Amino acid sequence: MTAHHRPDAATGPLRVQVLLYDGIEEQDFVGPYEVFSIARSAARAPLTIDYVTADVPRTITAGGGTRVEVGTGWSPWDADLLIVPGSGLTGPTRPGVELEIAKGDLPRTLAAAPRPGLVVASVCTGALLLGAAGLTRGRRCIKNQMVKDKLAAFGGLVTEARVVDDGDLVTCGGVTSGLDLGLHLVRRKFGADAADLVTRILEYEPRGTVWTS
């Protein structure tokens, strides 16, 4: 990925994809999805948003037991923004980030995703999947405060902020910061009025610092 590249000037609707896998944390993917859904419906932001898998359409079972029928397989060439949520750190034998890293398939798939015009974002421990894919090496990034050392081990330049915007790589801290990530990206793409409307509907006040390159 090219540091600081900002592909925000593209015309047409913003195409958002949220990547799901077994063991994923519910709030990690529901938070940003809700932000973009409200931006589309209430602020009339021109965007599409879909859940996708890294392989074929299938049913995903999240960490809390929620089952999600995902109808779209891997197609990052059809996206302008790819969001990678995280999971609890349950070890390399139970579904979640650590098992996906141990298997290696998802990191290899993510490593091939970046292209000009695509922004890759992560929520919480989703940054570890990007790290295992080599996408955070030498880049400003953040994840859950409790396990920042794991992100640094992948070569990421861990930056103390709620949301870290390094152009075509945008990461955020733990769990609820997915809301802040979504609001920042709505503001970045569609402006302050759209983002402020979403915050009022959610009755959520953005927290913490946004670091921008």
Image (tube, grey):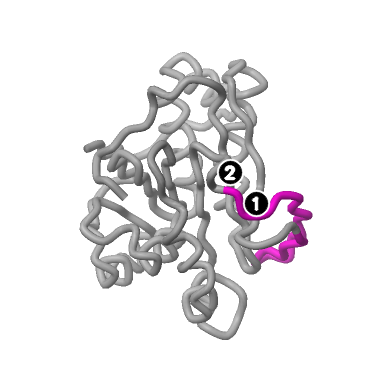
Q: Residue at x 40, y 59 (%)?
A: 127
Q: Residue at x 39, y 69 (%)?
A: 132
Total labels drawn: 2
The quarter in which the C terminus is drawn is top left
Which image quarter: residue 13? top right
Q: Which secondary structure lies at badge 2?
A: strand
Q: Amino acid at mark 2?
A: Gln
Name the side, left or right, on which 209 lies relative to 17. left
39 to 160, vertically: above or below: above
Is residue 209 visible in the rendered structure shown here?
no
As measured in the structure, the alpha-carbon distance from the residue carrying label 1 to the one carrying label 2 is 6 Å
Q: What is the residue that sits farthest to the bottom in this orientation? A: 93
Is residue 126 visible in the rendered structure shown here?
yes
176 to 13, vertically: above or below: below
**Label 1 packing within 10 angstroms: few (<14), some (14-19), many (20+):** many
Q: Amino acid at mark 1?
A: Val
Q: Which secondary structure lies at badge 1?
A: strand
Q: Residue at x 44, y 58 (%)?
A: 112
Circle number at residue 17: 2
Residue 1 rendering spot, x and y as whole percentages: 31, 50
**Label 2 packing within 10 angstroms: few (<14), some (14-19), many (20+):** many
Residue 92 rendering spot, x and y as whole percentages: 52, 83
Q: Which residue is mark 1?
A: 52
Please report the bounds of the magenta region as a residue range: 58-75
Answer whether residue 130 is magenta in the image: no
Q: Nearer the viewer, residue 131 or 88?
A: 131
* Sequence order check, earlier mark of 1 and 2: 2
Residue 67 rendering spot, x and y as whole percentages: 77, 60
Callout 1 touching callout 2 (CB < 8 Å): yes
